[in-house]
Image: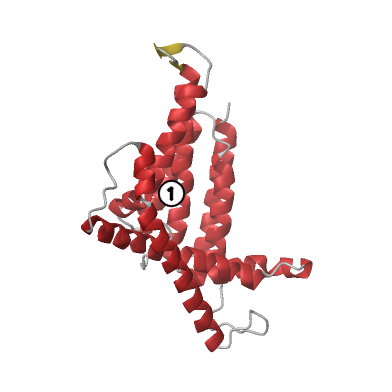
Amino acid sequence: MIGQYIPGHSPLHQMDPRAKLLFVFAYMFAVFLANNPATYGLLVLFTGIGIYFSRISLSVFYRSMKPVFILILLTSLLHLWMTRGGEALFSFSFLTIYEEGVRQAIYISIRFFLLMAAASLLTFTTSPIDLTDGMESLLKPFERLGVPAHELALMMSIALRFIPTLWEETEKIKKAQMARGADFESGHVFKRVKSYIPVLIPLFISAFRRAEDLALAMESRCYRGGKGRTKWRELHYSHLDVVLLLLFVILLTALWLLRK
């Protein structure tokens, strides 16, 4: 699932979390440099190599990307319907599909996939505690400007940690409602959305209960923020992080040269 950590000993697991965070943020900007089949092909190849070196099965990636496929499909349909330009490829009643619409639908779909794949690689190969330490270390210089680095890192880490938990809770509630006769598949779109109300209400109640339990647990352990706290594990850059930086520079250079 999105946000879930999968323990392993791959090269990506061994990298410093700060290097991976910086790379993912920079990679998300680099994706928007692609504007032709060659640049998108290069990004897909680079992402595929990253998935290979993460040593995580493709089935896990497929399951994590399933919720995103719906968003990709809806975005593609909007581009096919609304984008005009080039030669008209298909026309029926009020729907006319143009060459530019097909091109934009393909490019946007690939872009969404690349962004989610990079984010999934980050969470799959980096534990929540490492993500917290990495984000806190990167935000540390901004504390002079009043930015609460430790608190922001902790909030983001907790949010990532509870995505798989809430997803599992949703599935359990959905199956419980189906056992009581609830139908989530039949009917028109608005009826299906309405049928999820019995799922959302207990899910919100469960989420608030978990948040309250977490707050009480932190208070009982005398948590008072990051000021004065020491760390058992110190972060250190390694040669793998230097290799990642060099690969990104090569990727960025190749994207710039292949742009039209």
Q: Residue at x 58, y 33 (%)?
A: 257
Q: Residue at x 26, y 58 (%)?
A: 175
Q: Quadrant of the N terminus?
A: bottom left
The residue positioned farthest toward the right in the image shown: 145
Q: Residues within 10 Å of mark 1 (few under 14, many from 20)?
A: many
Q: Note whether residue 14 is visible.
A: no
Q: Which residue is mark 1?
A: 117
Q: Eyeballing the image, is 257 above or below 88? A: below
Q: Residue at x 44, y 23 (%)?
A: 102
Which x, y percent locates residue 184? 29, 47
Q: Eyeballing the image, is 166 above or below 94? A: below
Which x, y percent locates residue 143? 73, 70
177 on left or right of 166: left
- Quarter where residue 10 is shown: bottom left
Q: Eyeballing the image, is 89 above or below 121? A: above
Amino acid bearing label 1: Ala
